[in-house]
Every structure is written in C-alpha cells, then in structure tokens.
Image: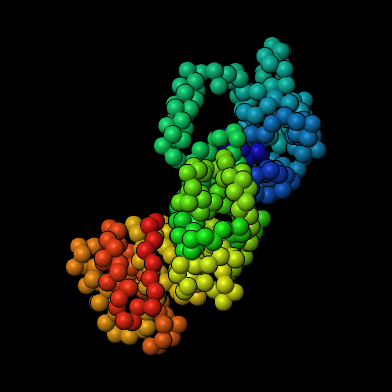
Amino acid sequence: MGFGKVGSEVARRAKGLGMHVVAHDPYAPADRARAIGVDLVSFDEAISTADFISLHMPLTPTTSKILNDENFAKMKKGVRIVNVARGGVIDEDALVRALDSGIVAQAALDVFTVEPPPKDSKLVQHVNVTVTPHLGASTKEAQEGVAIEIAEAVVGALGGELAATAVNAPMVPAEVLSELAPYVVLAEKLGRLAVQLVAGGSGIKSVKVVYTSSRDPNDLDTRLLRAMITKGIIEPISDTFVNLVNADFTAKQKGLRISEERVMVDSSTGYPIDSIQVQIANVDSKFASALSDNEQIIVEGKVKYGIPHLTCVGSFGVDVSLEGSLILCRQVDQPGMIGTVGSILGESNVNVSFMSVGRTGLRKQAIMAIGVDEEPNKVTLKKIGEVPAVEEFVFLDL
C-alpha cells in the first residue's frame, strides 16, 4: 500500500521470494509498476486479496486511520501486516481488536500514533505484535547509504547521465529510467539525424513526435524522450547544452514547438515502445528523399536487441544501427551499386560497419544506408556523388 521508492523496493524483494505482488497507490504510474511486474489494483481489492500487507504511504487526511474496523473486516483471516510508514495510518485500537479476533495473525510495526508509545500500550504488549524503534534513517548504515547515493548521483550527473532524483526535473522513477534507457539513445539520435537533414537557411519551428506502443497512451510517460529529441535537434545547431531540466524551456526560448502523438498498436513484444517517428514540417531538406508526400522530413526508428535502429527515411524503409556515422544515397535500383560505393569507400580506407537498402519497387528507386566508422573526406564523397546511378546523397554524423 503506497508504491513510492520504498514500496517499489519492497515489491522487488517480494517478487524475488516468488510472491505475486499487487499494489495500491492512486498516484503511481502504471508503467512503473509494470516494469517491476506489479499489478496496480483498487484499495478494496488490495486489502481483500493480500496475505501480507506492507504499508508505505504518507500520513494525510485521506490516509489517517485508513486501516480501521471496517477495512480489517474485508481482509483475509490470518493476514500479516507490516507498517513502516506512519503510525497514524492504522487505527491502533482497531488493530488490537483484529489481532484478538484472529483476522490479523501478526503485525510488525516500527511506527506508532504516539512515539514513543505508552509503556502500557496493548498493541506493543500484544503477543502477536513485533515492534522496533522508529529510527531506521538514523542508523549508521542508513546514513552511509544516503551519503553514497548522493555521491553517486552527483558523479553520474556530472558525467552526463540522467538524474532520477533531480528536484527541478520531471520525476522519472529508476524502473522507468532503466526500461526506457535504449529509447533515450534512440530519441536523441533521431533528433540529431532529423536536424542534419534540414537544408541550411530553413528555420525549424515545428516538430512532431509520434510514439507507437501497445500500452495505453496514458501509461506512457514520454517527457524524458521528448527532452532527448529536443537535445538531439538543438545541440548540433547551437552552443546550448540541453538536458532533462531545461529541454522544454530551451525549446520555447528558441521558438521550437514540439508536439507529441501516441498511437496504440497491437504488439506482444512487451516493450514499452514499438517505434518513434520524428517529423519536421515547413522546411527544405538537403536530402529530398527524406521528405514524405506532405513535404515533411520524416525519420523513424526502433530499438532492436537493445540497440537503436533507423527503420524509415521519408517513404523508404531501411534497417541500420544508429552507431558511428551514416551515408544515405538515393540511387537507381540496379545491380552493382553496393559494390561500387563500397569500393570507393574501401579505396579511401573508410570502414563500412553495416549497409541496408530500401526501395520503392523493383528496378525503380532505392535508398542505400551505409554505416561508416570514419568520416569520408571530400574527395571520397565527391566520387560517390559522381556515380551515374546515384541521384543524391548525404553524410550524417550521429
């Protein structure tokens, strides 16, 4: 009951013991619970089905004495209760009655309505109650743990990692952060790729991001991904450093409007996101094939085996890992093109890491996406452009 930081950690350990874990928390996002393998349920379902109830909720007017005679009556006979949250969330007299009647088999408490509890407290003296002092955060181990956590968070933030506990940024729970990690990389790469396809002199004013997912749109927290797409678009063309804290502000400051759309699709993969598509409208492109039928630059990607992949440019389907740098060529679909371009790169000692070809139809137009470990020099790029069947090409630094 209560699925914040402590509640979710207890859930992890309960899962490790082979328990089926349900949680009730009206403010917990479903995707965070799902990432741990926990079902979010109603209050009544939680207390009526549980064999063990662990409390991790704050004491508010809503939660004060939330476990009372009425709610103890809804529980399974023989339930065990652990309260390490706040003493006032349990009606202590009602708990004594529930213990005496056998509804509650055992209770473990380190918090009380009055601390320290009276020496003659029936609850503390009850044979089926285990009590400890409320001093968990004051122990040597807890203080050391907090110090280490702070130090690691600062080092990580200074190293450019995402900070899950930043007070001036959207709160992204560690479970969601871990689940979204490969999509964070994909989002930034797609933003970086899209902005490099914009022709010089074209001011970017509007960007649309489309997420496809099997999850309910309300269960998909995309603030982190939006921030990384903003970072990918802005950093290559300015000296501004963009992060989760300042992403929305920086975009607004630069007159960049970023809208989002979540599209639900049937998928059994279990992954949080099926694909991310970035659209930039009302601009010219240095690679015309990246434009869709409605004249928008479109790039789309997926995460495959934990690695971000580019899967679509304009109306052309491709499949290349977004690592290193990329050369996109639009060409006439004819034999020998892969060998010809590959030979030009090889002669310049440019190593090809991967290659993918997407085409509109047999012997019509095709896009060749080539991953390279080094940036080809101008002479090499010129030779690629001079191949008769190559209609256009662009080099992109990812």
Q: Is residue 229 above or below residue 161?
A: below
Quarter holding the C terminus is bottom left
Q: Is residue 396 above or below residue 296?
A: above
**Which residue appears farthest toward the top when viewing the image?**
119
Residue 135: % across, % down: 58, 18
Side of 84 where 304 appears, left or right = left
**Which residue appears farthest toward the bottom when viewing the image?**
363
In the image shown, does 110 or 56 lie closer to the viewer? Answer: 56
In the image shown, does 126 or 247 lie closer to the viewer? Answer: 247
Side of 377 where 159 appears, left or right = right
Side of 68 where 314 appears, left or right = left
Count up the numbered dots. Answer: 0
Residue 317 appearing in the image: yes
Instruction: Give the residue at x 63% y 55%.
Output: 257
Instruction: Give the residue at x 29% y 85%.
Output: 335
Residue 34 appearing in the image: no
Quarter holding the N terminus is top right
Instruction: Give the residue at x 74% y 46%.
Output: 44
Instruction: Give the residue at x 54% y 51%.
Output: 230
**Which residue appears farthest toward the front when viewing the image?**
201
In the image shown, does 213 or 93 lie closer to the viewer? Answer: 213
Residue 179: % across, % down: 50, 50
Q: Is residue 2 above or below residue 119?
A: below
Residue 389: % across, % down: 33, 82
